[in-house]
Amino acid sequence: GENVEQHPSTLSVQEGDSAVIKCTYSDSASNYFPWYKQELGKRPQLIIDIRSNVGEKKDQRIAVTLNKTAKHFSLHITETQPEDSAVYFCAANFGNEKLTFGTGTRLTIIP
Amino acid sequence: GAVVSQHPSWVICKSGTSVKIECRSLDFQATTMFWYRQFPKQSLMLMATSNEGSKATYEQGVEKDKFLINHASLTLSTLTVTSAHPEDSSFYICSARDRQLAGASYEQYFGPGTRLTVT
């Protein structure tokens, strides 16, 4: 099946600085790569996603880049704020519609 | 739009009993519903995929006789944990894909989760 690796597992960033989280996937047929933010005890919240026909996508302070040749994609958060503190998961689809999630990154924004 | 609900939000049951969790798409019809399990400080693990009117497809290592899934309509899927044991204690989350967007979007809409504690 699909394997998705995510790094780092924890990340502390000074408020206002940027945070980068990286993921690699194994299935070359994957073509959908969402990123989720999850707060404790809550549902995963989609923050941005990218399809394989696009190399980069941006939404205000959040951007995702995809390198399909190398099979890796990254989440970039700029001008971080305390409310960005959460666990972030990357995911990749396999078998067309099923998602495999990365292991998660606990992001802490230091005021 | 695209709201998914789960009921109950939390449940405590005794070892050996069964627990049913409901997942509903409130404002759309779901082409496919998914059930995930998430242990503390871990990632979401896909348990099974279900489509209305057909048998669920279980991921490797998930016991289909223990985790019964019924997908009776385009807006409702249920997960029954049978003969629950303490090791089944977890956060169970469902998600659904919008039938109308199925051809254009892979997005899954997640329910708020159900925290199951087996004593």
Image (cartoon, helix red, strand yellow):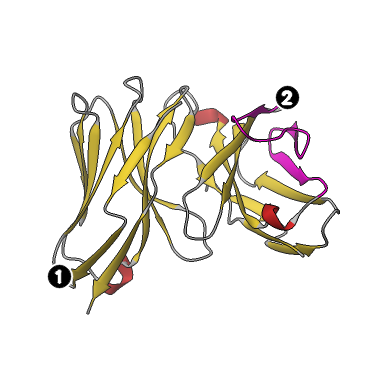
Picture coordinates of residue B54, whole percent (x, y): 73, 23
Circle 2 residues within 10 Å: few <14, some 14–19, many ≥20: few
Residue A61 is marked as: none
**Residue placed most toward the observer, B31 or A89:** A89
Q: Is residue B16 left or right of residue A56?
A: right
Mark 2, chain letter?
A: B
- The spot of residue A11 in percent (x, y) is 25, 62
Q: SS of the residue at dot 2?
A: loop
Q: Quadrant of residue B47?
A: top right
Q: Do marks 1 and 2 both belong to one polypeptide chain?
A: no
Query: Is-magenta flag for residue B80?
Result: yes
- Residue A60 visible to an observer of this rendering: no
Residue B93 in sight here: yes
Task: Quarter of the image for the C terminus of chain B: give it.
Answer: bottom right
Residue found at the very far right of the displayed protein: B17
Q: Which residue is mark 2?
A: B55
Residue A55 spot, x, y in % from top left = 18, 32
Establish if B60 lies above or below A11: above
Q: Which residues are magenta?
A: B55-83
Seen at 18% across and 73% down, the residue is A15
Q: Are marks 1 and 2 in contact (CB under 8 Å)?
A: no
- Whether A51 is drawn above or below B83: the answer is above
Read off the residue under disc 1: A16
**Inter-mark Cα distance, 1 to 2:** 49 Å
Q: Secondary structure at mark 1?
A: loop
Residue at image location 37% in from the left, 52% down from the top: A104
Name the residue at the bottom extreme. Answer: A111
